[in-house]
Structure formats: structure tokens, C-alpha cells
Amino acid sequence: MKTVSILAALLLLVTPNLAWSATATHETLDLTTSMVGYLSLLIFVLAYLLVIFEEQLHLRKSKPVLLAAGLIWIMIAIAYQNQGLDHAAEVALRHNFLEYAELFFFLLVAMTYINAMIERRVFDALRDWLVAKGFSYRALFWLTGVLAFFISPVADNLTTALIMCHVVLTVGKNSPKFVSLSCISIVVGANAGGAFSPFGDITTLMVWQKGIVQFNDFFVLFIPSVVNYLVPAAIMSLFIPAGMPDSANDGDVLAMKRGGMVIVGLFLLTIITAVCFHNFLHLPPAIGMMTGLSYLKFYGYYLKRTQQQEKSHRFDAKFQEASKHSEQTDSPGFDVFEKIAAAEWDTLFFFYGVIMAVGGLGFIGYLGFASGVIYGELGPTTANVLVGIMSAIVDNIPVMFAVLTMNPEMSLGQWLLVTMTAGVGGSLLSIGSAAGVALMGQARGIYTFGSHIKWLPAIALGYAASIYVHMWINADLF
């Protein structure tokens, strides 16, 4: 889970209702009360239990969902063939697979850029700059949280959280309380920061790519997202230890490699390209991302051709000595295909399994039934708040995919609400987001499930406040 992306976040075109896609040319069956339906539900639940206990079992999360997706669609296909409907399942599955293909290439490009920036030591340079400045514990608490908030809309929340956590672990090695509180702040900040950007979180990408919310509309969530972070952060900051950390970097500072900032610029240009493809040309954003990958490929070619000039980039006089060390340890050139190979393939296959498995349940008829119960009886506001709470327990990817598959009739304000709650709801528990799970491993024994849940009231207060602020300042959208 090194670079779950970014943008992490970044789940594309999600099918609205698979049964509808097949209805145009084929009859559909209600399998919700059949043995096929019951077995499909059981298989999905068992697979997801294995995903939840991934860390304990040391079983990659993609394996159970890949198997579950295959078994569910095998049973669906057999059920339809027994009724003489040989191609109905095929039509639905092909549509679903096409949507995943766009997701795959979008995420692959994003992950490649993030890996390139990691290899060029862009994030190492930022980390070491923070460490070298000698901030106080309280200043570092706010700096790491605010940076997590503003970096995660562009980079994925997992990578952002890991970078900031490394900073607090480096400077706070003698203050476990500072580390624990800072990790909670980082998780909340990273998740909140991704909620107001189409590229900031998987859930926002899903909704944007589906065309339900336009690119510019997401930014009305900025103030609610700020509130979601600031409320718990302000409360926790009152308990940060006073004083300054000891010198933590021991003079071992790595400087950025040549071309690091150019790759950052190319990544931003790639994002702009994807947005333009979607907004102005009405083409899939994945095509824009693939076009942007060519920018990195050509620049990688330039770096490789000029590798004899490879020198660490000096952006601060304090790092000149470290640059000499960097020149000795730099790799002999830049290979873009190594960055592609380093993509988080387990995550990409996990997304495939989730989309196919949940899509199969939707085609069986379960999600249509659930939509009527949840959104029909509880109402959209209550349902969308509960979606966020559920995402603290179950990964927000299948939760948000299920909502989009249900495709309930909602206003723009309600769609923005569920987008925000699904993204920030994962902060309620340490296991509710990839950032929280990763930081429990990185700060093992210091940032734990128990240390996080102690601050659940403060985080829940921020969650409730962000919902209230959104419904207040964006009332005209409801």
C-alpha cells in the first residue's frame, strides 16, 4: 500500500444501475430471493471479511474480492442461461468492465506520477525541510495537519499521511503523546482535504466521473471540509506537549533529485489535461490522463539522455552537503516503466474485484431494493449521514459504489453531502481509511485503534459540524 493514490484517490466512471444497462436489449431477472442471490451475498460478505482482516492474515485484499467477483458472475450467467437469456449477463458485465478499464488507466497514470515524485525525492525534500526548521511541537502539529489537508487534494491521502507521519516520528521520538495526536490530526486532515477536490479522494472521483457533480461544484465543499479538520484539530491542540523537540535529523538530509519539480509541474498539467478532456471535449478523463503520461515519458527520455548531468537539486543552502551524498547514491537514470511497474497493483485489482462484485449484486437486484429502503424510508439526508458512518467500518469504495449503483433521486446538495460524508467518515475510526490503517503500522504501538477512538467525540463533532455547515452555506443546492 505504498502509493494508493491519489488521489487517491481516483475511482472512475461507476455504473449507475447495471440492470438498467441490460434492460435496453435484454430482459432482467429478480434473483434477490433465489439461491443464486443468497450465495452471492454470502460470498461477498466472506470476501470482505478477509479484506477487513488483511493485516492480521497477511492476505492481500485483492485476492478474496477477485475470487468473489468471478464466482458471483458465474452464478448469474448460469441462472440467466437456464432461463434462455444467454447474453443478458454478458451485456451488463461488458459495460461494467469498460467502466473499470477507464478507472484502471486513470489510476495507473496517477500512481506512476506519484512514484516518479517519490523516486525524485520530492516528498523527502519536503519532509527534511520541515525537520530542519526546528519548529515547536505545537507548530509541527498544525503544520503537518494543514499540509496533509492541502496536499491530499492533489496527492492521495495515503501517501500524504505517510509523509507527514514520517515527520512527526522523526521529530517526536521522545514524545509519544505528540506523535499519537499528530497522527490523528494527519488522518483527519488528509481525509478532509480530499473531500473538496474531484481528484482528492476516490469517492469524489467516482461522483465526478459519473457526471453527477461538475468539476467546479466540488469546491463549495471547501469550507465544510475545513470545519471537519479544524474542529477536532483545535481540541487536540490543547493537549499537545509544550516545548521544542530535540534536533532530529542528525544532519542526514536528502536533497531532491534533478527534475523533481518539473515532474510536479507535469503532474499538474496532466490533471488540467484530464479536466479539459472531460469538461470541454466530453471525452473520458482517462484519455486525458493517458495523454499526460506522454509528458512524463518524454521528460523521462530527456532525463535518461542527460543522465551524466544527474545532480541533486539544491533548493536551500543547508542542503548543499547533503547534495554531495545524493550524487553518490542517485540511480544511473530515470526509467518511466520502472515507475509504472511500482504502481500499487494490489489496489488496482482490489478496485476491479469490488466493482465487479458489487456490480453483480446490483444486477441481481439487491441494490435497487436497498435504495428503496434506505433512501425511500429514511430520506436522503439521514441516509447520506449514515453512509459516512458506515464508511468508518467498511471501505468507502464499495459503499460509494453501491450508492451510485442505486442512483437515488437526489439534489446536487445531497450528492455533495454523500460525497463528503463518504470521504471524511473514514476518520471516525483508525480502520476507516487507508491513511489510518497505514499510520497504525508506521507508528506501531503509539498510534493505535485505542488511541484514535479516545478522540472519537472530537472527530464526530467535526463530522457533524461539517454536515451542518454544508447544509447551511449551500442551502440553495438542496
Image: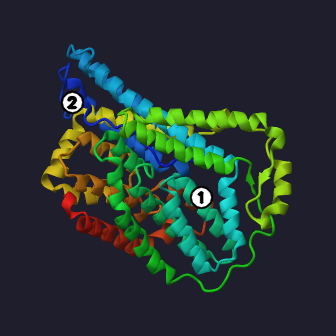
- Taking depth in this image into account, of 384 and 291 the one nearest to the observer is 291
Residue at 53%, 63% (x, y): give it: 148
Residue 25, above or below 243: above
Is 254 rendered above or below residue 345? below
The residue at the far left in this view is 377
Q: Nearer the viewer, residue 298 or 256?
A: 298
What is the CA distance from the residue labelled 2 to the residue labelled 1?
41 Å
Q: Is residue 219 left or right of residue 129?
A: left
Image height check: is 397 above or below 124? above
Q: Which mark is residue 162?
A: 1
Q: Position of residue 248 (x, y in %)?
A: 74, 72
Q: Secondary structure at mark 1?
A: helix
- Disc 1 residue type (three-letter): Leu
Tell me what residue is drawn at x 70 percent, y 64 percent. Answer: 128
- Which circle's residue, 2 or 1, is located before the other in the chain? 2
Colour mode of the rendering: rainbow
Residue 48 falls in which quadrant of the image?
top left
